[in-house]
Amino acid sequence: MDSGQVFGFRRLGRGRYEGSIDGRPVHLEHVRGSLTAAANGAAPSARRLREYFDLDRDLGPLYEFLGSDGRTRPALRAYRGLRLIRQDAWESVAGFILSANNNIKRIRSIWAGLSRYLGGDGLEFPSPARIAAAHERALRQLGLGYRAPYLQRTACFLSRNDAYLSEIRKAPLEEARTRVMALPGIGPKVADCVLLYGFQRYEAFPVDVWILRVMRSLFFKGRRATPEKVRELAARKWGRWAGYVQQYLFHASRTGVI
DNA sequence: GACCAGGCCGAGC
DNA sequence: GCTCGGCATGGT
C-alpha cells in the first residue's frame, strides 16, 4: 500500500488502511499475518482479497533472483513478502497519467480530490465517463496542472470505446504496449506501469528516475544508461519476473535500503 | 527560493 | 529518427 503502486488508500495506523476495491469503500487491517476487510456494504470476499493482493503466487523464483545477487539482496531482506497489487486497469491508467513528473504524496492528494468531487457516494475513484463530463478547469482546480487535458482526453476516449482496455488485455505484449501508449498522456514509462499494475504483465519494467538511478548504480558501474538499455538488461536478467524485481528495487531505493 | 517529483508532448533539427 | 524546452504544482 505504501510502495507507490496504488494511490487511493489512506493509512489510518499500523497495518490499517481505508480505500476502495472494485469501486466499493473498504477498511483493511493487517495484523500478525492476518488480513481482514470490513465495509459498510458488501466487503470483498476472502477469495477476492487473495486475488487482489496476488497472495497465491509462489514468489520462490523471485526470491531466488533477488537473494542470489549481493546487489539486490538488501531489497529482499527488507521487503520479503511485498507483492504486486492486481489493480483495476482504468485506475492504473488514470493513476499513472497523474504520476508524470509528480511525487507520490501529491498523486495521492489529487486522487483523493478526484474521488471526493467526481466520485460516487462511496468516494470511489470516478469512472471515465464522469471525468469526461468534468470541465478541464475543474480538474486543474484539483491540482492536476498540465495533466488535466491528458486525463480528460483519455477518459473521453475510453468512455466512448469501452472495449479498448479489455482488448489490450488479450493482445501480445508489444502490441498491448503500443495501444496503451496511444492514449493521451501515456509514454513508455507510464505504459509499462499500466501493463504491470493494471494488466498483470509481469515482464514490464517501468523505468522512472528512481529505477534509473538504482540500476545505473548497481548494474552499470554508475555510468550513463538510457531507460531503453535498462529495460533490455532487466528483460534479459529477470524475464517474467522483471516487474516484480522492479517493485522491490523501486521501494528499496525510495526508502534508502539500497 | 531553489530543486525535485514513478514524464510526456510538440517543435525543431 | 533524436534532442530539448515547456509544462503546473506542492513537498522538501
Image (cartoon, coloured by chain):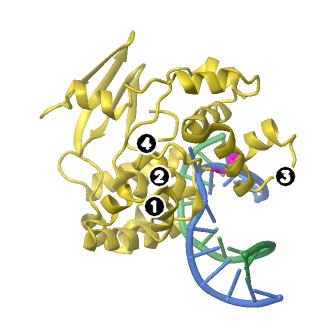
Chain colours: A yellow, B blue, C green
Residue A195 disc label: 2
The answer to whether residue A224 of the structure is visible from this angle is: yes
- Amino acid type at circle 4 is Val
Question: Disc 4 designates what residue?
Answer: A6
The answer to whether residue A133 of the structure is visible from this angle is: no
Mark positioned earlier in the residue sequence (2 or 1): 1
Whether callout 1 and callout 3 share a subunit is answered yes
Nearer the camera: disc 2 or disc 3: 2
Distance, label 4 to label 2, CA atoms, is 14 Å
Instruction: Say if A250 sits above or below A66 in the image.
Output: below
Distance, label 2 to label 1, CA atoms, is 8 Å
Question: Disc 1 designates what residue?
Answer: A176
| A98, A34: nearer the viewer | A34
Marker count (numbered): 4
The residue depicted at 32 percent of the width and 68 percent of the height is A158
Element class at badge 2? helix
Mark positioned earlier in the residue sequence (4 or 3): 4
Whether callout 2 and callout 1 share a subunit is answered yes
Mark positioned earlier in the residue sequence (2 or 3): 2
As drawn, the residue found furthest toward the top would be A32
Instruction: Say if A86 sits above or below A177 in the image.
Output: above
Which portion, as a residue range, is magenta?
A207-211
Are dots 2 and 1 in contact, CB under 8 Å?
A: yes
Instruction: Say if A150 sits above or below A258 in the image.
Output: below
- Amino acid type at circle 1 is Ala
> x%, y% of residue A219?
79, 39
Are dots 2 and 3 in contact, CB under 8 Å?
A: no
Distance, label 4 to label 1, CA atoms, is 21 Å
